[in-house]
């Protein structure tokens, strides 16, 4: 059996094309690493984008290991739509249609120009690549909110590709059983953020 801990990256900065983490994002990644020390982690893989890779670097360093692989399939939609600087939801204007889409649960309206079926196939293929490469053990895979949505939607055979809003550094657990069946055990786990102020631990993220 192999278990994949699908991690969403920490909170990034805004106003650049490929942002790294904000101080809050680094702090939350360290909290997650502390929480993960109680588990046997056999590999750490990541999206190539800076916000995910930096999250993975913090996790790997805190766990006294290296990043094992960088998987292009785990990247978000940034390069699939018109190039623009990244804006975190926390920094969006109140009338921004993307913020309205997230706050009202219309997640697929966040990126209306995205080819959803194609994106979903890529996200699921990335998950399958991890399963094929790591036949047993536990793998931390640092990715993005859209990738988590799409991959899990495909495993669960859901009609919607984007269906929930995973928090920064949240964890979703997916297992490939020895029988070949893939199961989702949990989604959007933020146990490592408990005890933080509500706005810091549970604010709207994208």
Image (cartoon, rainbow, N blue to C red):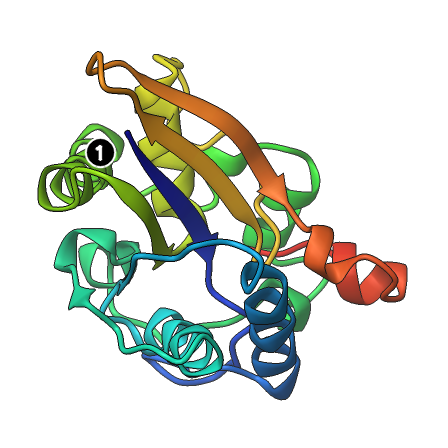
Q: Position of residue 127 (x, y in %)?
A: 23, 39
How many numbered tags mark residues here? 1
Q: Position of residue 23 (x, y in %)?
A: 62, 87
Q: Position of residue 177 (x, y in %)?
A: 29, 20
Horizontal side, residue 75 vs residue 149: left or right: left
Image point (45%, 74%), residue name? 63
Horizontal side, residue 204 vs residue 197: left or right: left
Q: Indicate whether 194 appears above or below 29.
A: above
The answer to whether residue 120 of the structure is visible from this angle is yes
Identify the residue under disc 1.
Answer: 124
Image point (38%, 13%), residue name? 159
Q: Indicate whether 42 appears above or below 133.
A: below
Image point (56%, 72%), residue name? 29
Q: Position of residue 174 (x, y in %)?
A: 39, 32
Q: Give the quadrant of residue 194.
A: bottom right
Horizontal side, residue 149 vs residue 32: left or right: left
**Element under label 1?**
helix
52 vs 204, nearest the viewer = 52
């Amino acid at each position: 059996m192999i278990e994949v801990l699908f991690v969403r990256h920490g909170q990034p900065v805004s106003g650049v094309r490929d942002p790294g983490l904000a101080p809050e994002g680094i702090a939350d990644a360290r909290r997650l690493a502390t929480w993960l020390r109680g588990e046997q982690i056999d590999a750490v893989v990541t999206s190539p984008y800076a916000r995910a890779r930096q999250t993975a670097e913090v996790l790997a360093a805190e766990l006294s290991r290296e990043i094992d692989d960088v998987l292009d399939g785990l990247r978000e939609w940034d390069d699939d739509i018109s190039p623009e600087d990244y804006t975190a939801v926390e920094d969006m204007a109140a009338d921004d249609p993307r913020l309205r889409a997230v706050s009202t649960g219309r997640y697929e309206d966040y990126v209306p120009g995205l080819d959803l079926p194609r994106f979903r196939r890529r996200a699921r293929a990335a998950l399958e690549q991890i399963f094929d490469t790591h036949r047993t053990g536990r793998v931390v895979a640092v990715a993005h909110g859209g990738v988590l949505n799409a991959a899990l939607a495909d495993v669960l055979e859901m009609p919607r590709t984007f269906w929930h809003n995973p928090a920064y550094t949240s964890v979703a657990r997916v297992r490939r059983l020895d029988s070949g069946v893939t199961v989702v055990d949990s989604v959007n786990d933020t146990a490592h953020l408990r005890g933080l102020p509500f706005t810091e631990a549970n604010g709207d993220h994208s």
